[in-house]
């Protein structure tokens, strides 16, 4: 007499590998753009990418294993977009590292002090999403400007992305990156450019954190807000739609501790995965909901392995044509930009404050060394207070 055969773990393991591949290859260009904008050298940016892969991989493994749910952790793509549009602040790269650490402290505080989470929840979603949309706009126009300035480099990427949107939408951005890598290879051969062998070996580069008011108001607070509003809260909702109730406090503790540990090595923030969470939590990953946690563990392990490619990805960026990597980053953010715009203007009663928030964030202004994201939030809340009082 034979017993019931043990279900194979192959399917959820493969789903986890796909989740990690799609997540990393789709948005690593955004992360590198953001870290470079706030002062990271190529070596420091590679270190940031590596430590993000390590911390989000370990957090995914722990949460999925401990709670037997397909919980996945990712880097904060909206947060990286905030960095890209903020640029250098007073104190340079070390102040940006200090802002990463402060943002981690705020994430931990939301786990330990429920009132802070309640205060964040009081920020109207329309204003939070309008701020994000304004931050993303300059990045999302990069493919358009790139088609004009360097069409021979950007056009192949756009064509591959368009074809894949029709036939394989999940792989559209990763395959666009493959097309970009091909363009870089051809460009490097034709111009004689190359990366040194030592530059493709990953290593951690630590920086002593400092703080400045520009870093606190221009990086730490916007980074914290967009990470919570655009990643953690939607991540909880997406998991709930698949029947999983993610434990809030342990999830915030894991991502907050991970962010704190990675900050001095250049990691800006990790959080619960949002859009990519569905790849591991949906029935396609594993028909049995009780076994999908394996996909979460597989995602974490795969993310750690992909961290070994961090320096090679930076080396690729260094030798790429000037317009190519911003174009790839912009394409990767199209979906996030569209969703943010839709949520920002969905409620007619909140539309005017949202529009003001969007315009201020998109302006790219810096006042007293503080970037546009902070002023956009203030402007939107002010207009909302005025218009709602009048109503």
Image: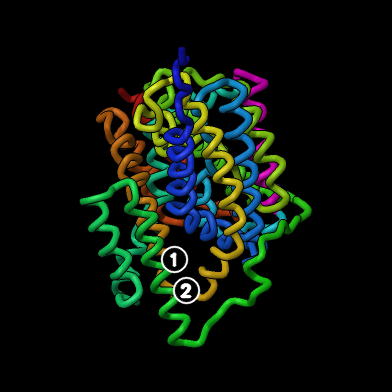
Label 1 residue SS: helix
Q: Earlier in the sequence, mark 1 or mark 2?
A: 2
* Quarter of the rendering containing residue 253: top right
Q: What residue would you read off at disc 1?
A: 325
Q: Residue at x 32, y 40 (%)?
A: 339
Which residue lies most toward the right here? Answer: 208
Q: Which residues are magenta?
A: 95-115
Label 2 residue SS: loop
Q: What residue would you read off at disc 2?
A: 320
Q: Residue at x 33, y 25 (%)?
A: 390
Which residue lies most toward the left here? Answer: 166
Which residue lies most toward the front here? Answer: 1
Q: Separation of disc 1 and disc 2 at Cα?
A: 7 Å
Question: Where is residue 350 drawn, in percent x and y?
Answer: 32, 30
Mark 1 burial class by Cα count in 10 Å: few <14, some 14-19, many 20+:
many
Q: Considering the image in quadrants, where does the C terminus appear?
A: top left
Can see residue 111? yes
Image: 195 above or below 218: below
Q: Residue at x 39, y 48 (%)?
A: 134
Can see residue 378? no
> Who is closer to the viewer here, 319 or 381?
319
Image: 367 above or below 198: above
Question: Where is residue 354 drawn, in percent x and y?
Answer: 35, 38
Report the magenta stretch's main SS: helix
Q: Residue at x 42, y 34 (%)?
A: 11
Q: Are marks 1 and 2 in contact (CB under 8 Å)?
A: yes
Asked whether residue 77 is drawn in magenta, I would say no
């Amino acid at each position: 007499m034979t017993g019931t055969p043990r279900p194979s773990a192959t399917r959820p393991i493969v789903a986890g590998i796909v989740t990690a591949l799609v997540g990393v290859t789709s948005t690593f260009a955004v992360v590198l753009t953001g870290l470079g904008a706030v002062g990271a050298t190529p070596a420091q940016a590679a270190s940031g990418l590596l430590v993000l892969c390590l911390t989000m991989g370990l957090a995914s493994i722990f949460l999925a294993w401990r709670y037997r749910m397909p919980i996945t952790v990712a880097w904060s793509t909206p947060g990286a977009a905030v960095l890209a549009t903020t640029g250098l602040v007073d104190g340079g790269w070390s102040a940006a590292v200090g802002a990463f650490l402060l943002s981690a402290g705020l994430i931990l505080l939301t786990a330990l002090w429920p009132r802070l989470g309640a205060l964040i929840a009081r920020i109207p979603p329309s204003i939070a999403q309008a701020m994000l949309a304004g931050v993303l706009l300059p990045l999302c126009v990069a493919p358009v400007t790139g088609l004009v300035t360097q069409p021979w480099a950007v056009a192949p990427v756009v064509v591959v992305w368009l074809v894949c949107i029709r036939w394989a939408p999940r792989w559209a951005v990763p395959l666009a990156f493959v097309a970009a890598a091909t363009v870089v290879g051809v460009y490097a051969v034709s111009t004689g450019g190359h990366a040194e062998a030592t530059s493709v070996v990953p290593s951690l580069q630590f920086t002593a954190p400092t703080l400045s008011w520009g870093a606190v108001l221009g990086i730490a607070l916007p980074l914290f807000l967009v990470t919570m509003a655009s990643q953690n809260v939607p991540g909880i909702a997406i998991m709930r739609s698949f029947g999983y109730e993610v434990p809030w406090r342990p999830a915030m503790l894991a991502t907050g501790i991970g962010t704190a540990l990675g900050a001095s090595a250049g990691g800006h923030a990790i959080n619960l995965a949002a859009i990519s969470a569905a790849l591991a939590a949906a029935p396609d990953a594993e028909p049995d909901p009780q076994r999908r946690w394996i996909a979460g563990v597989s995602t974490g392990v795969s993310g750690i392995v992909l961290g070994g490619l961090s320096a090679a990805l930076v080396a690729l960026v260094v030798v790429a044509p000037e317009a190519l990597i911003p174009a790839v980053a912009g394409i990767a953010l199209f979906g996030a930009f569209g969703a943010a715009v839709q949520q920002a203007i969905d409620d007619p009663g909140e539309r005017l404050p949202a529009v003001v928030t969007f315009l201020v964030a998109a302006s790219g202004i810096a006042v007293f060394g503080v970037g546009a994201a902070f002023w956009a939030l203030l402007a939107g809340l002010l207009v909302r207070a005025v218009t709602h009082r009048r109503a």
